[in-house]
Amino acid sequence: MDILVRTDASAVATTAADILARYARAHATIGVATGSTPLATYRELIRRHQAGELSFAGCRMFALDEYVGLDYSHPESYHAVIHRELTDQLDIDPANVHVPDAAADNLQQACRDYEAAIEDAGGIDIQLLGIGGNGHIGFNEPGSSFDSLTRLKTLHPATVRDNARFFDSPDDVPVHVLTQGLGTIRRAGHLLLLATGQAKADAIAAALEGPLSASVPASLVQLHRRATIVVDEAAASGLKNVEYYRFVDENRPEWQQ
Ligand code: GLP
């Protein structure tokens, strides 16, 4: 794991955008995430695109997850969020932006089709991830198998409460979702996990320094040969080994810069 500690959320976004820009230049397949954390990174990518510095025309994107039971036109469907917050403001071909089809009549088939679409694209080169307060990634709640593929999941009540802020009432938050599995996420060539704010400190400490455990789905990053974790000071505040992570970052060999 490469753990990068930055002063604040804006510095986290700059570092994440630098990493993603390298993949955009290589016409990569990029896995994108929802939630509030990546929004600053998306704004920075859009800024670079609008400044003429960065093109996504050669890229494909796959979202992590989607709510079951929300029409695509609902502003909080992840289909709508990914288009509004990111892809509609870039030069990527909309046909190359994929979100699990949670409106399908046959959800199991939709999950299989999503896995097949990722495979047809040659796999995901870099997968951007946020982290839930309970350590979930995508919508893989505690107890998710490290081998799981895209499937239907039931949200944890804590996730429903967390996500209620996006809806008029907590009763409006769907409890079922389709999400890439931990096995799907694990196959990506590079994992880029972002976390900002004190509310994520315990989840980050458990994921990076706790045991590898299905109870903390984000601990999957410990199993991956190429995982970059970018956190601000607040999200890093529960890490025991932070002095070492900073030392590694400050003494990066030239070939790695
Ligand atoms: C949702 C998403 C996750 C995201 C999490 C944290 O549950 N499915 O992908 O990481 O929220 O969101 P936030 O970044 O808003 O804290």
Image (cartoon, grey):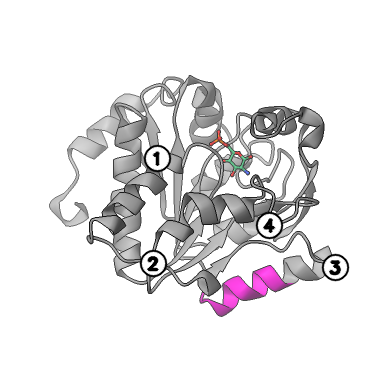
Tag 2 near tag 4, CB within 8 Å: no
Q: Secondary structure at mark 2?
A: loop
CA separation in Å, label 2 and label 3: 32 Å
Tag 2 near tag 3, CB within 8 Å: no
* Residue 8 image point, x, y percent: 33, 27
Question: Mark 2 or 3 closer to N-term?
Answer: 2
CA separation in Å, label 2 and label 1: 19 Å
CA separation in Å, label 3 and label 1: 35 Å
Residue at the location (67% across, 49% down)?
Answer: 77
Report the residue marked by disc 3. 106
Q: Hey, which residue is sitting farthest bottom in the picture?
A: 120
Q: Is residue 36 above or below residue 94?
A: above
Amino acid type, residue under disc 4 in the picture = Asp
Query: Is residue 180 at least partly visible in the picture?
Result: yes
Report the residue marked by disc 1. 40
- Which circle, 2 or 4, is nearer the viewer? 2
Q: Is mark 3 within 8 Å of ligand 1?
A: no
- Which circle, 4 or 1, is nearer the viewer? 1
Estimate how packed mark 1 is, as few (under 14), some (14 to 19) or many (20 or more) residues with alpha carbons within 10 Å: some
Amino acid type, residue under disc 2 in the picture = Asp
Estimate how packed mark 4 is, as few (under 14), some (14 to 19) or many (20 or more) residues with alpha carbons within 10 Å: few
Query: Is residue 1 at least partly visible in the picture?
Result: no
Amino acid type, residue under disc 1 in the picture = Ala
Q: Secondary structure at mark 4?
A: loop
User: Where does the magenta region start and end?
Assistant: 113-122
Instruction: Tell me the tag on residue 147.
Output: 4
* Residue 162 image point, x, y percent: 66, 29
